[in-house]
Amino acid sequence: MKAFAIVNLKGGVGKTVTAVNLAAILATEYQRRVLLVDCDPQANATQSLLPPGEYNTLAGLLTIPDAYYDDLLYRSSIRGLDVLPADDELRNLDVDLLEGERPRLTALRDLRDAIAEDDAYDVLILDCPPALSPACAAAIAASTDVIIPIKVDAYSVRGMHELTAQIDRLRRIYPDVHIAGCLPTVWYKSDTVEQGEALLRQHAPCKVFRTHIRRSPKVDESTWTGEPVVSWSPRSGAAQDYRAFAEELLGKEGDHGAEV
Ligand SMILES: Nc1ncnc2c1ncn2[C@@H]1O[C@H](COP(=O)(O)OP(=O)(O)O)[C@@H](O)[C@H]1O
Ligand SMILES: [Mg+2]
């Protein structure tokens, strides 16, 4: 089973927008049974896919040994897309770590194995926080493919090496984790962005996806509606690009894509 972790140590680079839209596309256009796991205490993916309410969340899974995953899954309004929610309890895990309590770093990997054994979903998407927190490390450890959304500016491009080095450290423990590539997001036509993208494509320490995601005002608009931009504004540049990205990722263009 494929498990895509959407990772960048920076905030505001389009991780959540990528996670939510990729999840929606795989569920609706590819008829995959998708579970989106929200690993960020800011819980933006949860808020965009589930109505406000009280939920059992990932923090429980990471702290309670043998937690039963069925109690943590919620249906979204998109057919085929379920959510394992987050809340700000996840922040306490960082504090617990300082106090000597160890969150279960294999909890999400165990969840992936249990889901595969039960044939409950076809694909997992893990939306990560902008820090290598216990939840983020658990998400990377559970993934088969890491996708790195990146806004093309000098800080981000330089930060790539640090990020891939940190992922490599985890890969020494979990060698089946692989970096699928980085995905330029919030792209717009300008000399700065185009030159930055060219530099990224030359020097990135990993593959850079051919597709980039255009900046589109419809994305911000969609965050108010509780709908991914691919359904809120299917013809917007960002929606078209996310569909092209899914196609590239799944290898429908004769590339060595990820069999999902
Ligand atoms: N392609 C895009 N076009 C315009 N705005 C975008 C795009 N992708 C993301 N954004 C906006 O950028 C902000 C950060 O995106 P988000 O996915 O929450 O980032 P992260 O999860 O990395 O912190 C949000 O306000 C979102 O609406
Ligand atoms: Mg986010």
Image (tube, rainbow, N blue to C red):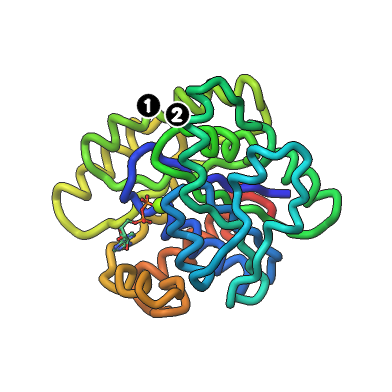
Task: Bin the neighbour count of mark 1 within 10 Å (Cα to Cα): few under 14, some 14-19, many 20 and up.
Answer: some
Q: Residue furthest left?
A: 191
Q: Is residue 251 visible?
A: no
Q: Which residue is drawn at 55% across and 68% down?
A: 24
Image quadrant in which the C terminus is located = bottom right
Is residue 66 positioned above or below 26 on the image? above
Number of numbered discs: 2
Q: What element carries label 1?
A: helix
Q: Which residue lies furthest to the right in this view?
A: 117
> Residue 109, located in which quarter of the rendered image?
top right
Is residue 227 positioned above or below 209 on the image? below
Give the percent coordinates (x, y) of residue 107.
Answer: 69, 38
Which residue is the site of mark 1? Answer: 161
Q: Which amino acid does label 1 sit on?
A: His
Q: Which residue is drawn at 28% across and 37% down?
A: 156
- In the displayed structure, does residue 60 sit left or right of residue 192? right
Q: Which of 56 and 193 is in front in this view?
A: 56
Q: Is mark 1 within 8 Å of ligand 1?
A: no
3D distance between C-alphas at marks 1 and 2: 5 Å
> Residue 80, located in which quarter of the rendered image?
bottom right
Q: Is mark 2 on a helix, strand or loop?
A: helix
Q: Which amino acid does label 2 sit on?
A: Thr
Give the percent coordinates (x, y) of residue 256.
Answer: 61, 47
Which residue is the site of mark 2? Answer: 164
Task: Bin the neighbour count of mark 2 within 10 Å (Cα to Cα): few under 14, some 14-19, many 20 and up.
Answer: some
- In the displayed structure, does residue 83 sit left or right of residue 187? right
Tag 1 near tag 2, CB within 8 Å: yes
Q: Residue at x 75, y 45 (%)?
A: 67
Q: Is mark 2 within 8 Å of ligand 1?
A: no
Give the percent coordinates (x, y) of residue 15.
Answer: 42, 51
